[in-house]
Image: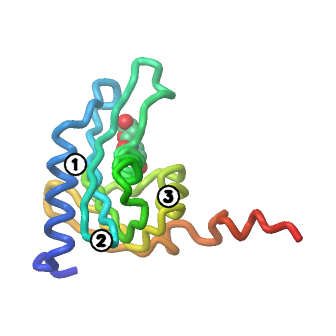
Amino acid sequence: MPASDPVVYSMTRAAAAARENAYAPYSDFSVGAAALARDGRVFTGCNVENVSYGLSTCAERNAIAAAVCQGGHDLTTIAVVTSASPPASPCGACRQVMAEFGIERVILANLAGERFDLQMHDLLPAAFDRTSLETD
Ligand code: THU
């Protein structure tokens, strides 16, 4: 993927900035995410942990929640930035939420400049979606 791709550049920058605000005192694993809406707006999120570990929330879902709260629920792309090498992949719960809001492109990046450019249908094949609710 060309580093000059302006979407990749701006989205990973936004996700890296959000990652700076991660609240991860228990895992010490900071994650930042940036979600791009079809209207061009970018919404960011970071992981927010809790001493009651199960209450911790992921960066991707926090970015998507921020988008929805501000009327940006038609999403196309998400970028996720961690310090992991290779770049970390979204958890299963986040994949399901990404699918709900139409995300098709998933950019994974790390601080060393490694980048993966993935398609949602490869990360979550045979997804449970609204057609799954049609019983008759
Ligand atoms: N985390 C995310 O923010 N996104 C993911 O897709 C996977 C995991 C967070 C949750 C927790 O705060 C830390 O990373 C370690 O699991």
Q: Amino acid at mark 2?
A: Asp
Residue bearing the label numbered 1: 83
Q: Mark 2 or 1 closer to N-term?
A: 2
Reply above or below: 127 against 5. Answer: above
Reply above or below: 55 against 19. Answer: above
Tag of residue 39: 2
Report whether the residue tagged 1 is closer than 8 Å to ligand 1.
no
Question: What residue occupies the far top of the structure in this picture?
Answer: 51
- Residue 16 lies left or right of residue 79; in this view the side is left
Tag 1–tag 3 contact (CB < 8 Å): no
Disc 1 residue crowd, few under 14, some 14–19, many 20+, Cα 10 Å: some
Q: Mark 1 or 3 closer to N-term?
A: 1
Residue 34 place in picture, x, y as percent: 27, 56
Tag of residue 46: none
Which quadrant does the N terminus fall into?
Answer: bottom left
Looking at the rendered structure, the number of numbered marks drawn on it comes to: 3
Q: Amino acid at mark 1?
A: Ser
Q: How many angstroms separate mark 1 from mark 3 (CA)? A: 20 Å
Question: What residue occupies the far front of the structure in this picture?
Answer: 71
Q: Name the element at disc 1.
A: loop
Q: How many angstroms separate mark 3 from mark 2 (CA)? A: 22 Å
Q: How many angstroms separate mark 2 from mark 1 (CA)? A: 30 Å
Q: Closer to us: mark 1 or mark 3?
A: 3
Tag of residue 95: 3
Residue 40 place in picture, x, y as percent: 25, 70
Disc 3 residue crowd, few under 14, some 14–19, many 20+, Cα 10 Å: many
